[in-house]
Image (tube, rainbow, N blue to C red):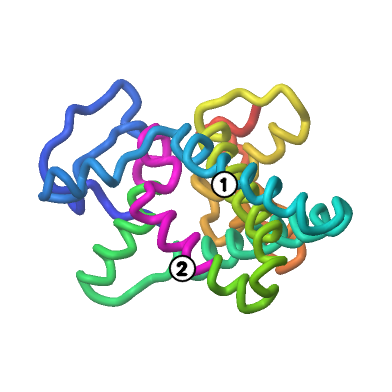
Amino acid sequence: MGRSMNNAIGPSEPPLDPLAASPRIFANPVLDKFSRTHHLVPLLAYSPLVIASLWWSAGRMSWPAIAAAAIAGYLSWTILEYFGHRFFFHLHMPGQLGERVQFLVHGVHHDYPSDPSRLVMPPLMSLPILSISFLALRLLWGAEMVVPVFGGFLSGYIAYDTLHFHLHHGRSRTLLGRAMRRCHMLHHFQDDSSWFGVSAPWWDMVFGTVPRATDKRSERWSGTGR
């Protein structure tokens, strides 16, 4: 569903695996640098906030209340992940400007799904999303309870980005891990109108975005038919 290589600005050296290319997508070198992120950045940047939220909450409420709030926050993230991926990342906007915006938001990932520097959200994208989410959660939960809720929300986001990188570049040894990789690869290489929940594929089952059948040739080509 991504756009073609012609949308990228400037040449790039083709790697051995063309799906792992990391083309320049902005003419401005600073913007282009900010479009790439090491896969450990979300873990290192946001884990301290999760720990701080638990430490702050521990002095003000019971552990069962903290656990319940954190679970609610985590589930909130998974819902945002599913609907954001389905209706925002895969939104088809008209015109050349619409195509360009969609390419920058998500199309580049579908064109180059193995690009290791664009498998997690750069801070330029994650910070606004998380900031708006915090404000929305504060309205729903209040000034005190939002702290453990947002801690769970952040944990869900960290898990999503870490898992996303692993699904593309790791090798799962468990049945669950292989099943999640298979679902995500089918989304990339067979049917991009299915399996929007990267870290939470159960939402696809709830909202009816599980494909009815699979093409075995497509599975073998995408590396899922192992």
Residue 24 in the magenta stretch? The answer is no
Give the image quarter of residue 223.
top right
In the image, is 220 to the left or to the right of 74?
left
Location of mark 1 (residue): 49
Q: Secondary structure at mark 1?
A: helix
Instruction: Judge whether 75 appears above or below 92 on screen.
Output: above
Spot occupied by residue 87 in the image (x, y as percentages of width and height):
51, 70
The residue lying toward the viewer, choosing from 210 and 202, is 202
Magenta span of residues:
111-133
Q: Main secondary structure of the magenta part?
A: helix
Describe residue 160's horizontal placement relative to residue 36 as left or right.
Answer: right
Q: Residue at x 56, y 37 (%)?
A: 162
Front position in the image: 74 or 70: 70
**Residue 215 visible to an observer of this rendering:** no
Q: Is residue 65 above or below residue 36?
A: below
Earlier along the polypeptide chain: callout 1 or callout 2? 1
Q: Amino acid at mark 1?
A: Leu
Q: In the rendered structure, does residue 126 fall within the stretch colored magenta?
A: yes
Quadrant in which residue 226 is drawn: top right
Q: Which residue is mark 2?
A: 88
Most extreme residue toward the front, as rendered? 59
